[in-house]
Amino acid sequence: MSSIMNFLRFWYNFIVGDDRIIAAGVVLALVVSAVLARRDLNAWWVMPVAVVVLLAVSLWRETRTAH
């Protein structure tokens, strides 16, 4: 049982890491991309926008807490 828990902890740490907000933003961006693609709309732009927005959010949060 401990090997299964170690395996699950590895994947949780690998995917979520230290920042749950960024991980949730990535999941949200993937869901939006999937919904747009399913409706036959262009979804290519969602992930680049999400990267820029999430990077800005991450930098803002880190610089705000550094002071």
Image (cartoon, rainbow, N blue to C red):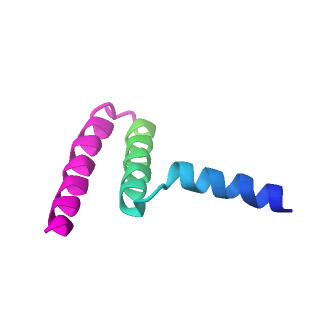
- Compared across the picture, whether 64 is left or right of 20 comes to left
Q: Residue at x 39, y 33 (%)?
A: 40
Instruction: Name the spot of residue 64 as percent of width and height, x first.
Output: 15, 66
Of 29 and 55, the residue lying toward us:
55
The vertical placement of 44 against 17, above or below, is above
The vertical placement of 16 against 39, above or below, is below
Of 60 and 45, the residue lying toward us:
60
The vertical placement of 35 against 2, above or below, is above
Please give the count of numbered marks on the rendered protein: 0
* Chief SS of the magenta region: helix
Instruction: Name the spot of residue 55 as percent of width and height, x first.
Output: 24, 47
Q: Residue at x 86, y 62 (%)?
A: 1
- Compared across the picture, whether 19 is left or right of 17 comes to left
Q: Residue furthest right?
A: 1
Say if the magenta span includes residue 49.
Answer: yes
What residue span does the magenta drawing correspond to?
40-67
The vertical placement of 46 against 6, above or below, is above
The answer to which quarter of the image holds residue 66 is: bottom left
Instruction: Name the spot of residue 4 as percent of width and height, x first.
Output: 80, 56
Instruction: Name the spot of residue 26 as percent of width and height, x first.
Output: 39, 49
Of 53 and 3, the residue lying toward us:
3
Q: Residue furthest front?
A: 67
Of 27 and 56, the residue lying toward us:
56
- Compared across the picture, whether 35 is left or right of 5 comes to left
Say if the magenta span includes residue 28.
Answer: no
Q: Quadrant of the C terminus?
A: bottom left
Q: Residue at x 28, y 45 (%)?
A: 50
